[in-house]
Amino acid sequence: MMRRVASLLASFLLVASQAIAGGPLRVTGAMAMAPGQPFVWVVTSPVRYTVDTGPLSINPSGQTVISNSQGLALVQSLFQNWQSVPTTAIQFAYAGPISGVSGGDVTTIQDFNTVQGSCNAGTQSPVIFDANGSLIRALGLDPLVIGFTATCKLDPVAGHIQSALILLNGEFQDGVNDPSTNNYEISADQFDEAITHEMGHFSGLDHSQINVDLYQNGFVNNCPVDELAGLPLMFPVEFCQSRKSAGLPILAPDDMAWISKLYPNSAYSANYGVISGFVFFSDGITAVQGVNVVARRVDDPNTPENESQRIAFSVVSGFLFTGNPGQSITGDNTAGSSFGGRNPALIGYYEIPVTPGTYTVQIENIDPSFTGGSSVGPLDPPAVTYGADEYWHHYESAFDNPAQKDPITVQAGQKISNVNFIMNQTPPRFDPFEDGETERIVPKIPMFIRRLDVLRDRS
């Protein structure tokens, strides 16, 4: 049951959005001064948030389990997890109680709508305490949602996040575990991780897929520590034991890398380099969007830890390109998304921040179950492509050995470019029987049906 509870950790976005994995949650579109760039907060001063004045958690009898003062202290400490990353410039500041509702306590759906309205207007970024899960139910969400984030207002020209909200479902901390009423309990550490995850979305981060084999192999609360160490907090679902219980920091290397890349401080360039390149179909020409790219530190045989599992970073190919370009024949972009770049050169491009060291780089499909609020990358549902399971090596071709891998050494401040993949066994782009002309063949990419649990509006 813990896996089911955890699988609904993913954020529920209440506005149209463009999800980009292992990095920015949204990317600027055609209206922007700089299209194809991440939406970020202005961090010349701390990002200010308001907090609910009610209790964080009450039990079914109405008794307070986690008081407001305890909840406020928890929120401040969890934001600290992100701002304490030594290479990021983002900071957060408590701006007082939620405004717009009586006493600042959001208890009804009418209160929620009022507060969301002020968030949509950009006047506050509220953190709401749903003390008994009643708001989750009133919103029509699954009662197993631990929390969600909504980006309320964006500046599509400057590419800035202007306001957002977070809701915490305190029912998971009410001391009651009663499956007959869908009232489940998780540990305090797991709850803290779930809310810190939501604060990552609040900051502009999307989901990230690393060590996905743990999830696919059915681990629950007993994940091997080496793989748990590399599992991003921004992984779409929570299913392992808490990182704290395993003696690990709450943020994985990938989490720290991306919060730093989006909001670099003066120490960033001295602590990170970049691996970049393109992913192509078998013709070596046609770019592929939606393939996960993972850089793994080469394991040091002189240590007991497996660094290739512990130290890994990722992004999805085409992460800066729109997930829905619409049609451009008439120039009106009918049915296209307002988010994401339209430069075709971005379609298969990837760029991964890494700490200095030696790495192997590999590509893989996004897990087909990661859809809607659990999506990873610009495509929802994800595209599953044949041939998207191989390591990079110097002599990439459509007929190479996918297990062959060549190490890449990256120094601080260095960008290694053109680490390009040519996938095996995909349809060719050119018709070999044509003489003097070419024919484009649309790659056959099997698509998986969207789950109807927690959905995003991709309009």
Image (cartoon, rainbow, N blue to C red):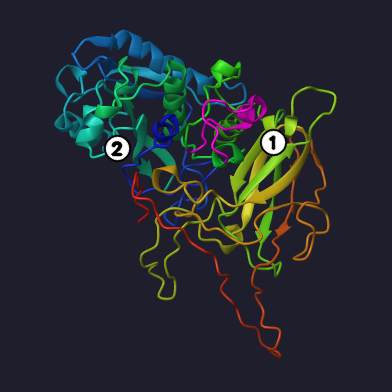
Badge 1 density bin: few <14, some 14–19, many ≥20, Cα 10 Å: many
Front residue of 103 and 54: 54
254 shown above or below 34: above
Which region of the structure is painted magenta? 217-236
User: Which corner quadrant holds the N terminus?
Assistant: top left
Q: State the mark number for residue 211.
A: none
User: Which corner quadrant holds the C terminus?
Assistant: bottom left
- Residue extending farthest to the bottom is 435
Q: Is residue 232 magenta?
A: yes
What is the quadrant of residue 198 in the picture?
Answer: top left
Q: State the mark number for residue 354.
A: 1
Q: Residue 238: image x %, image y %?
A: 48, 31
The residue depicted at 60 percent of the width and 45 percent of the height is 315
Q: Which residue is mark 2?
A: 142
Secondary structure beneath dot 2 equals loop
Specify which label sits upstream in the sequence, 1 or 2.
2
In 3D space, how far apart are the residues under numbered discs 1 and 2 (Cα atoms)?
A: 37 Å
Badge 2 density bin: few <14, some 14–19, many ≥20, Cα 10 Å: some
Mark in the foreground, 1 or 2: 2
Q: Residue 243: image x %, image y %?
A: 56, 21
